[in-house]
Image (tube, rainbow, N blue to C red):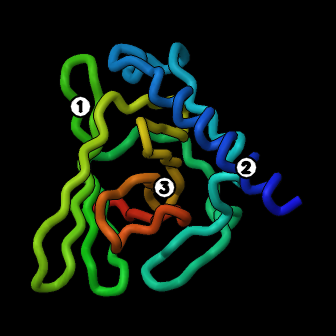
């Protein structure tokens, strides 16, 4: 039964990744044409990393607002930043990760699909909440960003 549950979680996550990745850049700026289905959110993760604390995703209420330009987070001394880049007909998200004394690791997610308080791209899921944004990266390309937890990024002033 445990193997079956793990298989189903993986299968559902793969289907969701394919669905989110199928949004075109033009759809990302026209709400309503593109849908990001995070109704399977508990299958992705129910936990959020807030600094060094782990809390339940149910502690965060959806917030219907547009994405701001810049967000940041700190995880165990490492500084993470998110930059939302809107260009003509597309939206991209650039995430940086820097540990003290280390090099800056950058991941860029193109063709971000936005629908109300949720957004996504290939290997990236996001939710707008009153505290900022929750981000879940499936392939962050750096060891310090968890693949099994959402990360809270607070809006920069």
Q: Give coordinates of residue 104: x percent, y percent.
A: 13, 67
Earlier along the polypeptide chain: callout 2 or callout 3? 2
Q: Distance between the residues labelled 2 and 3?
A: 20 Å
Please say if 87 is above or below 127: above
Viewer-closest of 50 and 137: 137
Closest to the camera, between mark 2 and mark 1, is 2
From the viewer's perspective, is 104 left or right of 32? left
Viewer-closest of 134 and 121: 121
Q: Name the residue: 25% across, 74% down.
A: 79
Please say if 129 is above or below 30: below
Residue 157 seen: no
Badge 2: few (under 14), some or many (20 or more) residues near its Cα, within 10 Å?
A: few
Q: Name the residue: 44% across, 45% down.
A: 124
Find numbered disc 2 in the image and state the secondary structure of the residue it sits on. Answer: helix
Q: Give coordinates of residue 87: x percent, y percent.
A: 19, 26
> Mark 3 — residue?
136
Earlier along the polypeptide chain: callout 1 or callout 3? 1
Q: Give coordinates of residue 28: x percent, y percent.
A: 40, 23
Closest to the camera, between mark 1 and mark 3, is 3
Q: Give coordinates of residue 151: x percent, y percent.
A: 46, 65
> Mark 1 — residue?
86
From the viewer's perspective, is 146 left or right of 14? left
Q: Distance between the residues labelled 1 and 3?
A: 20 Å
Earlier along the polypeptide chain: callout 2 or callout 1? 2
Q: In which quarter of the image is residue 57?
A: bottom right
Q: How many marks?
A: 3
In the picture, the disc for residue 7 is 2
Badge 3: few (under 14), some or many (20 or more) residues near its Cα, within 10 Å?
A: many
């Amino acid at each position: 039964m445990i193997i079956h549950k793990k298989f189903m979680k993986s299968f559902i996550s793969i289907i969701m990744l394919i669905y989110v990745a199928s949004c075109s850049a033009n759809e990302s700026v026209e709400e309503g044409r593109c849908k990001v289905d995070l109704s399977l959110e508990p299958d992705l993760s129910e936990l959020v990393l807030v600094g060094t604390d782990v809390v339940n995703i149910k502690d965060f209420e959806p917030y219907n607002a547009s994405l701001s330009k810049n967000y940041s987070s700190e995880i165990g001394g490492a500084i993470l930043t998110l930059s939302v880049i809107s260009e003509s007909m597309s939206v991209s998200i650039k995430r940086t990760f820097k540990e003290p004394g280390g090099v800056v690791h950058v991941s860029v997610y193109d063709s971000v699909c936005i629908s109300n308080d949720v957004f996504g791209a290939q290997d990236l899921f996001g939710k707008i909440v009153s505290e900022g944004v929750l981000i879940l990266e499936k392939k962050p390309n750096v060891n310090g960003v968890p693949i099994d937890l959402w990360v809270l990024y607070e809006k920069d002033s």
